[in-house]
Image (tube, grey):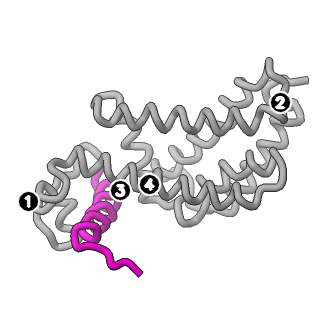
Amino acid sequence: MTRKKIRDIRHEEFIVAALEATHKRGFHAVTMSEIAAEIGATAASINYYFGSKDQLMFETMRHLLRILGATHKQYLDVALDPKDRLHAIFDAHFDPRFFTPQHCSFWVQFWSAAPYSAHLERLHRINQSRVKSHFRAELAPLVPAPFRETMRRILQSYLDGVWLSVAQADRDIDPRHARQEARSLIELVLSGKVGGSN
């Protein structure tokens, strides 16, 4: 078993600290000192390991995307048909390991800040392209072509809306219920009762 390097351990600690501190104080308001204080470190340590607050936030989002990607793959590996693969998108986003108040808060605040930073915007474009690609691929065998993009927007907007609602503390975290709601919406969309595919 490969032992983790001290640098990798510190990276992980600061990423967890960034998630927690951002949840408490806000993406723009939180300072490097406040992030570092979460683990009893100093702002200078963040500069040493990441170079800047902006880079720490970038690496924190990359960390979340890696978790999401691995979780999505786990659900896809047991999917039996196209509808199961569509469910897998939501199951991954609403998995208890990923769907947490800290993650939702950071996720929403990061994407809202991304248009104002070329560095963050690049990651935003990659993620948006990835999510659209997943939805389009799974909807292709299930929805007639003229309605496919409308269905994709409906489902993706629902997904984004749930995360935004949790980030704003308008909705409690309940991964099981969120997955059930997503399944109900998928059934409505595929039946043509939402989006006008009949």
Q: Earlier in the sequence, mark 2 or mark 1?
A: 1
Q: Which residue is mark 2?
A: 143
Give the magenta range. Answer: 1-26
Which of the labelled discs sits on residue 64, or is there none? 4
For badge 1, the amino acid type reads: Ala
Q: Earlier in the sequence, mark 2 or mark 4?
A: 4
Q: Is residue 53 magenta?
A: no
- Mark 3 Cα-neighbour bin, 10 Å: few <14, some 14–19, many ≥20: many
Secondary structure under badge 1?
A: helix
For badge 2, the amino acid type reads: Val
Secondary structure under badge 4?
A: helix
For badge 4, the amino acid type reads: Leu
Q: Are marks 3 and 1 in contact (CB under 8 Å)?
A: no
Q: Are marks 2 and 1 in contact (CB under 8 Å)?
A: no
Q: Please name whichever residue, 148 or 176, is drawn nearer the observer in this view of the structure.
A: 148
Would you place residue 131 above or below residue 60 in this image? above
**Residue at the image position 80 percent from the left and 18 percent from the top:** 146
Gap in Å between the C-alphas at discs 3 and 4? 14 Å
- The quarter of the picture where the N terminus appears is bottom left
Q: Which residue is mark 3?
A: 23
